[in-house]
Amino acid sequence: MFKPFEWVQGERLAPSLQSRAAFLNEARDVVQGAQTLVQLLEWDEDRRDTATSDADPAPLFDACQRSSLQRFLAVSLGLLHARIEAQCEGLTE
């Protein structure tokens, strides 16, 4: 059975902190994935810009794929931001 990786072991925490631990685990994964994807897109862009002949390696992503991945990043980070704001509001109530 698949068990997702946990940065913070939620089951070891008090029940009142378990949902916060679950959120932190998801947020950390989203941020690390976004960082990796941005680095990959930058590397691929550099690869495309430096290609001077047909013998040079082609970029991994075409313009449509690049645009789709950039929208994915924007939406993912936007959703994460909304959840962070909700968590912050919950702390001040």
Image (tube, helix red, strand yellow):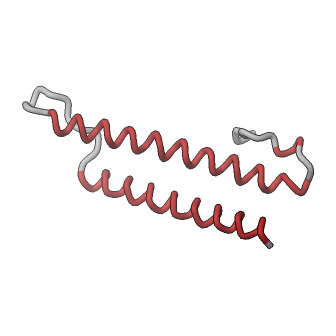
Residue 45's spot in the image, x, y percent? Answer: 25, 41
Residue appearing at x 70%, y 64% in the figure: 88
Viewer-closest of 69 and 14: 14
View extreme (top): residue: 55
Image label count: 0
View extreme (left): residue: 53
Residue appearing at x 73%, y 40% in the figure: 6
Q: Is residue 74 above or below residue 22?
A: below
Please tell me in which quadrant of the rendered image residue 1 appears.
Answer: top right
Residue 70's spot in the image, x, y percent? Answer: 37, 55
View extreme (right): residue: 14
Please tell me in which quadrant of the rendered image residue 15 appears.
Answer: bottom right
Viewer-closest of 82 and 47: 82
- Left or right for 70, reference 45: right
Residue 28's spot in the image, x, y percent? Answer: 62, 45
Placement of the C terminus among the 4 image quadrants: bottom right
- Left or right for 79, reference 93: left
Residue appearing at x 28%, y 38% in the figure: 44
View extreme (bottom): residue: 93
Viewer-closest of 80 and 54: 80
Q: Is residue 70 above or below residue 6?
A: below
- Left or right for 79, reference 1: left
Residue 91's spot in the image, x, y percent? Answer: 78, 65
Residue appearing at x 36%, y 57% in the figure: 68
